[in-house]
Image (spheres, grey):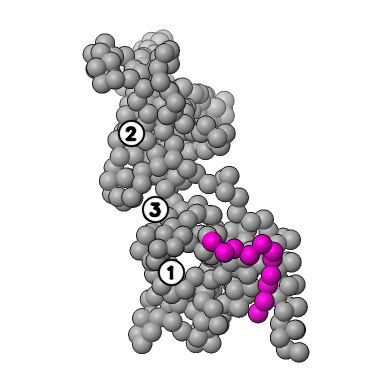
Amino acid sequence: MLARMMRNVSLIFCGAVLGGQALADPSHSAAHVALWPTIPFVRGQDLCQYQDAYGRTRAQQASDMVRLLGDLIRAGAEPKQAPELLQTLDSLIDQGRQRATGGFGMDVLLEGSFKAALDRVYELHHPQVRKVSFFNPTALSELVRVLRAQQRQGSLEAKPIEGLTGMAWGTYSFSPGCKGDVLVTLHLETQTGHSFNYQARGMPESVMGQIAYQVFSQFQKTHFPSQVTYLGKTLELLGAPGNVLGTTNSPRKAQFACECIQARLPTVGEYVYLNELGDWNGGVRSDKGLWALSQERVMAPEMPNPSMVRSVKEFQSPEIRYFCVRHAIGKKTATQCSP
């Protein structure tokens, strides 16, 4: 009788999970992308000048102008000459800004900074597989010729571009505040039709470091479902129903949720192995917090003595995280939930 009641509860729980949340869609995961080496950046509206013109009311601008005129007269300027001096100063400021922002150097700086920053992130984390790279369609001799001519790679004629799987382009504008920083947006589209957008604000030489880390995180982090090899078998990581990682207050609820998608909770050994792989090599970091195990147990990596496997009853109002796994062979073909 008790087993039947628990089975009914399990079925109701599964219906709520599957009815209210969608399972992870593999089409949304980020695979390896080989980008065209030239990243064009288009200059957008100068937000610094825009703020100068519209950041204050006309009355405030008039008040500032009167104050400046008074300062010039007190400094010894003739009243008739003061307006002309103000106009000259304003013209000199505009000329300086035009010289600083003229030409085509900013796009080259942003492209080079992005590539260098992306390499630094990869060097720092050392993932086993690099999932973002730049496709080179030319022989090295041709590349040298292009660089000696102070040109950028941009021709697609008669080039073997079968390996090209993504394109990136961006926009930049000078930020409000007029302190030299820029607002940069990078757009990336893959051959499969997925698009990604990243944005950051900072000084030109450093802003692309923020965007490079966003790109690295997007493509290198574990996307569910995914597969790893564990003890000679293929282990599928499915995540939680409708989420990357699930959160619950009961290991039993987490177990039911996994059973609803023909999966199970990881074992202690699987948790430990996936933690060693880490977020950038197909694993999941699980070295902090509580993680759901079967039989109303949890894994508490931060409390290894006398054992990091504990009963859930030892914790008051716990927040337990979990994700679901299964072996790639021998899957069930129908949804079956059991206590």
Residue type at mark 2?
Lys
Give the residue displayed 67% in from the left and 76% down from the top.
Answer: 338
Q: Judging from the image, what secondary structure is the residue with disc 3 in? A: loop
Q: Judging from the image, what secondary structure is the residue with disc 1 in? A: helix
Give the residue displayed 55% in from the left and 35% down from the top.
Answer: 192
Residue 58 horizontal/vertical position (percent): 57, 25
Q: Label 3 to label 2, Cα distance in Å?
A: 19 Å
* Placement of 52 over or under 233, stated as above or below: above
**Between residues 28 and 207, which one lies in front from this camera angle?**
28
Q: In the picture provided, is 200 more to the left or to the right than 112?
A: right
Q: Dot 2 corresponds to which residue?
A: 115
Give the residue displayed 52% in from the left and 32% down from the top.
Answer: 191
Residue 327 horizontal/vertical position (percent): 52, 64
Kindly tell me whether residue 142 is visible in this rendering: yes
Q: Dot 3 corresponds to which residue?
A: 280
Residue 80 horizontal/vertical position (percent): 41, 10
Numbered disc in front, either 3 or 2: 3
For the magenta stretch, what is the residue range? Answer: 329-339
